[in-house]
Amino acid sequence: MVICRAMLGFPVMDSVASVVICLFIVKASYDILKDAVVKLLDTSCGKGYEVQMEQYIAAQEGVVRVDSLRSRMFGNKVYIDLEIQVDGETSLRDAHKVAKHVHDEVEHTFPDVKHIMIHLNPVNGTG
């Protein structure tokens, strides 16, 4: 049972309590709106996440170097655009196997990754 503050001799307390409750509602609304907008826009996953992923990818067999890695969040899933260097003398089939291996390993190791698009550059080429 709610006791009216005016009955206790403090009529101004009803107004103060209303303002405080209103501020809580506004704060909760702002947090919900901010989270929704961030999830709707493509935002980077952050430098730390990208560095960790880049180191993991660079250590994969067949990868000579990571040229470029860009991440973006969409909802609660991660999408990756990746450029890696492979030996320029490698056959197309073997280079594709390297890309497929990297793709599968990243999606397995980083479960929040929805998709990774991989572009291959030859080491002794210009890309």
Image: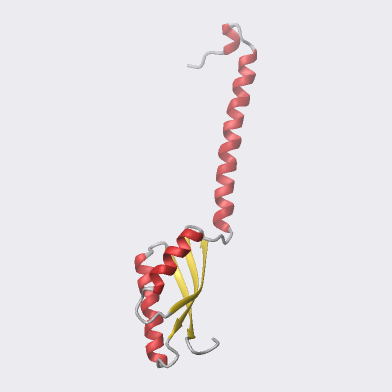
Residue at point 55% right, 38% down?
Answer: 28
Q: Position of residue 69 (x, y in %)?
A: 50, 71
User: In front: 21, or 82?
Assistant: 82
Could you tell whether 86 is left or right of 24 in the image? left
Q: Is residue 116 left or right of residue 26?
A: left
Image position, residue 103 (x, y; %): 40, 75
Q: How is the image coloured?
A: secondary structure
Q: Residue furthest front?
A: 124
State whether residue 71 is above or below residue 97. above
Which residue appears at 42% of the width and 93% of the height?
A: 89
Query: In the displayed structure, would residue 118 be above or below residue 93?
Result: above
Q: To which quarter of the image does residue 17 belong?
A: top right
Q: Residue furthest top?
A: 9
- Residue occupying image coordinates x 61% and y 17%: 14
Residue 32 x/y as whole percent: 55, 45
Q: Quadrant of residue 11?
A: top right
Q: Quadrant of the C terminus?
A: bottom right
Q: Residue at image x 58%, y 27%?
A: 21
Count numbered badges in the picture.
Answer: 0
Height in image: 97 above or below 8? below
